[in-house]
Amino acid sequence: MREFYELNKKEKFMIWFGGLVVVIVFAYFFYRSLLAVLILLPLVFVYRKMAQEKLKSSKREELSSHFKTMIEIVAGNLRAGYSVENAFLEMAKEISRDSSYHQRAGSPATKMAAFIKKGLENNIPLNERLKEAGKISDISEITEFAAVFGVAKNSGGNMIDSIGQYAAMIGDKIETEKEINILLSARRAEQKIMNAVPFIILFYLDITSPEFFSSLYHNPAGIIIMSGCMLLYLLAYYMSVRMLKIEI
């Protein structure tokens, strides 16, 4: 429960399988050798690390988006007359019952809701639990909300207004992120196409003119040249990923 972004068995399998496919594709197009599959196996671990980071980043964005809904539910419960702790408990129950939050097994939102619920049931102060949730999730909005919540509770401020205003602020940030993602979606599509183009060209030439690249395989000079090409491709891929990685 302490890891909101923990991957399930299916996700782990697909990552390992994807890494193996990448190694086989590289071994075929750059070396045409079964031995190259064994030599390139460390790339599976590089692919695994990058794929895990990408998937966890996606889950982090999902939780950030759902957190706005979660505190809106809390604000609604407070307006209905619930105490602060019971407002969060009811929110956790609602999240666990709503299938839209757990269509994929073990979604971050359901894990976080269960984390808060378990803390309250074990008499852990809500403010401390929220701080811990912010630390585990690595989401600044949750950490900031925990601070705002703590100040409002300790000072006896209007909890409903404080939570509602913070939900609106998170909503503005989410809308900004969506607008940026829309602007970058075309560039990301171009990136994926350009990443595939070298292999499409090699595949086309392999079918139409199999002798065209035959001199580059199974000889020292060809191995050096193709190794250089593979390293250049990996560098270009890494740079393209970094260029399109924007955080607010």
Image (cartoon, rainbow, N blue to C red):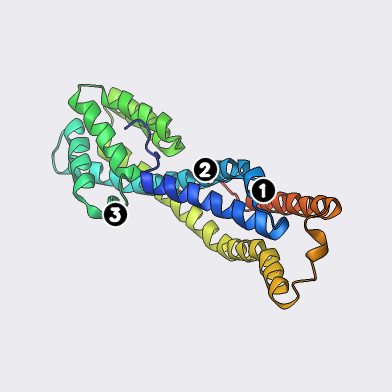
- Residue closest to the far left: 81
Q: Which residue is mark 3?
A: 103
- Residue closest to the far right: 221
User: As shown in the figure, which amino acid type bears the numbered disc 2?
Assistant: Glu
Q: Which residue is mark 2?
A: 53
> Number of callouts in the render?
3
Q: Which mark is residue 35?
A: 1
Discs 2, 3 touching: Cβ within 8 Å: no
User: As shown in the figure, which amino acid type bears the numbered disc 3?
Assistant: Gln
Residue 119 location (% of width, % of height): 24, 27
Q: Quadrant of residue 25?
A: bottom right
Discs 1, 2 touching: Cβ within 8 Å: no
Residue 90 location (% of width, % of height): 17, 40
Question: Does residue 164 appear in this view?
Answer: no
For marks 3 and 1, the one nearer the N-term is: 1
- Residue closest to the far bottom: 208
Q: Is residue 184 above or below residue 44?
A: below
Horizontal side, residue 208 vs residue 178: left or right: right
> Of discs 1 and 2, which sits in the foreground?
1
User: Which residue occupies the foreground of this view, 244 or 165?
Assistant: 244
User: Which residue occupies the foreground of this view, 201 or 212?
Assistant: 212
For marks 2 and 3, the one nearer the N-term is: 2
Tell me the CA gap for discs 2 and 3. 21 Å
Local secondary structure at mark 3: loop
